[in-house]
Image: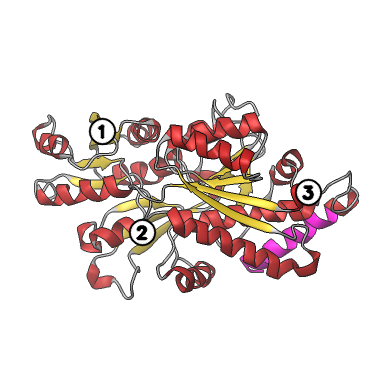
């Protein structure tokens, strides 16, 4: 049975269980205000706009269209609106926009929210408003740790997954001495902590780790320092993302650090980063990827639909937002209501497969999505066979190995 077949079986099983509890809408279930409202809150104008932005808004609209096509007249959610807002990667703006979406625009769920500081702010609003929040774009493990809450789901990836895929592998491959540079905010601090643990656990050493301004367009101070460290690092571990990563890699190549014996390991990379830089600028670089559009026929089939809508191949946040919106709407369908507490119960412990998440479980203890991920390597341009064909998947990391155990500090 393929992934989509398994998803169908799970959906049918969920519907039957709902029927045993009184059927869809049993217990007074209904759709509030006669419609379901999905809010996409992300960066549409700054350094993370390319990796998610309006592409993720389109992906959520695709999920809505597929839900309507699947259920037709039997759809519980007859009217569905998709709204979006730009938080500019600023926690204060994210806070304000989240309140507006939940209160004034009656959003039932907020999706995406890249930038960990912004995501933590929105998680607090979701908790206070008792409204569902699927964070896709941020990586901090605090979302399923001490700052977890009943209404927040961490969906796609986190710093533990990134560090233990890349840091462990690169160190075991022989790069024992690391110099880490990380953006000085919640995401970067968490990346530094998890990469340090992964590198040391694999027998490596962190010679030095430096926080950098965020956002930033000039990394020369840090890059020029690297060759003079003692001992000299074998690898520069960069924890930047989006536009900051693009700037850093350009400068890394300008200063010819690879020629000086300092390799490059990227903590978080998106296909848009490779596209912006050109694959030769990153050729051979290994990194952890939550999803790649050309890794399987199922992935490619969805990516073809996204390409037809947007003119480009999807990043993993685009695909994850589609999946998150789909699983939210499926939970509404099974329960017959968009009431937050009821939908949360439908999602907790859910096992499924879809076009993004394979062998997936939403862990009930902390609402972290567990799923298979990949260790990938950037192809040189000589191996690129078609536009956006930038990655070679080296291995699949099973869901139960890719993510950390549940944090006892999480109290939902």
Q: Are marks 2 and 1 in contact (CB under 8 Å)?
A: no
The location of residue 383, given as percent across then percent down, is 27, 71
Q: Label 1 crowding class (10 Å Cα cut-off): few <14, some 14-19, many 20+?
A: few
Q: Earlier in the sequence, mark 2 or mark 3?
A: 2
Q: CA distance from mark 2 to mark 1?
A: 24 Å
Q: Earlier in the sequence, mark 2 or mark 1?
A: 1
Does the magenta portion include 158? Answer: no
Q: Label 3 crowding class (10 Å Cα cut-off): few <14, some 14-19, many 20+?
A: many
Query: Residue beneath label 3, please?
Result: 337
Q: Are marks 2 and 3 in contact (CB under 8 Å)?
A: no
Secondary structure of the residue carrying tag 1 is loop
The magenta region covers 1-17
Q: CA distance from mark 2 to mark 3?
A: 37 Å
Secondary structure of the residue carrying tag 3 is loop
Query: Residue beneath label 1, please?
Result: 213
Name the residue: 29% across, 36% down.
Answer: 214
Name the residue: 62% across, 59% down.
Answer: 353
Q: Earlier in the sequence, mark 3 or mark 1?
A: 1
The location of residue 370, given as percent across then percent down, is 57, 46
Q: Return the residue nearer the eye: 32 or 114.
A: 32
Name the residue: 74% across, 62% down.
Answer: 9
Does the magenta portion include 8? Answer: yes
Query: Residue beneath label 2, please?
Result: 271
In the displayed orientation, state which residue is furthest to the front: 104
């Amino acid at each position: 049975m393929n992934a989509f077949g398994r998803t169908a079986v799970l959906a049918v099983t969920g519907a039957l269980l709902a029927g045993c509890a009184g059927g869809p809408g049993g217990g007074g279930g209904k759709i509030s205000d006669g419609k379901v409202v999905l809010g996409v809150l992300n960066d549409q104008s700054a350094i993370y706009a390319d990796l998610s932005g309006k592409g993720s808004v389109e992906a959520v609209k695709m999920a809505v269209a597929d839900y309507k096509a699947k259920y037709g007249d039997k759809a519980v959610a007859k009217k569905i609106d998709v709204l979006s807002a730009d938080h500019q990667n600023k926690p204060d703006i994210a806070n304000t926009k989240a309140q507006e979406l939940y209160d004034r625009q009656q959003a039932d769920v907020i999706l995406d929210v890249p930038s960990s500081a912004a995501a933590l702010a929105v998680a607090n609003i979701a908790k206070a408003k008792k409204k569902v929040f699927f964070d896709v774009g941020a990586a901090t493990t605090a979302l399923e740790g001490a700052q977890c809450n009943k209404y927040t789901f961490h969906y796609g990836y986190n710093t533990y997954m990134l560090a233990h895929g890349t840091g462990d592998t690169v160190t075991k491959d022989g790069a024992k001495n690391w110099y880490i540079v990380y953006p000085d905010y919640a995401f970067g601090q968490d990346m530094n902590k998890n990469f340090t643990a992964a590198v040391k656990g694999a027998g490596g050493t962190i010679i030095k780790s430096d926080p950098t301004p965020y956002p930033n367009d000039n990394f020369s101070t840090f890059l020029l320092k690297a060759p003079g460290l003692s001992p000299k690092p074998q690898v520069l571990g960069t924890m930047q993302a989006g536009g900051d990563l693009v700037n850093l890699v350009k400068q890394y190549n300008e200063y010819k650090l690879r020629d000086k014996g300092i390799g490059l390991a990227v903590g978080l990379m998106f296909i848009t980063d490779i596209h912006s830089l050109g694959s030769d600028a990153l050729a051979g670089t290994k990194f952890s990827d939550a999803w790649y559009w050309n890794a399987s026929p199922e992935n490619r089939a969805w990516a073809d639909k996204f390409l037809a809508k947007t003119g480009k191949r999807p990043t993993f946040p685009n695909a994850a937002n589609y999946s998150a919106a789909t699983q939210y709407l499926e939970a509404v369908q099974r329960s017959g209501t968009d009431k937050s507490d009821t939908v949360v119960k439908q999602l907790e412990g859910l096992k499924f497969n879809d076009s993004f998440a394979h062998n997936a479980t939403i862990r009930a203890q902390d609402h972290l999505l567990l799923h298979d991920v990949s260790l990938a390597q950037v192809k040189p341009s000589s191996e690129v066979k078609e536009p956006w064909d930038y990655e070679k998947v080296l291995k699949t990391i099973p869901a139960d190995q890719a993510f950390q155990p549940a944090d006892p500090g999480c109290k939902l």
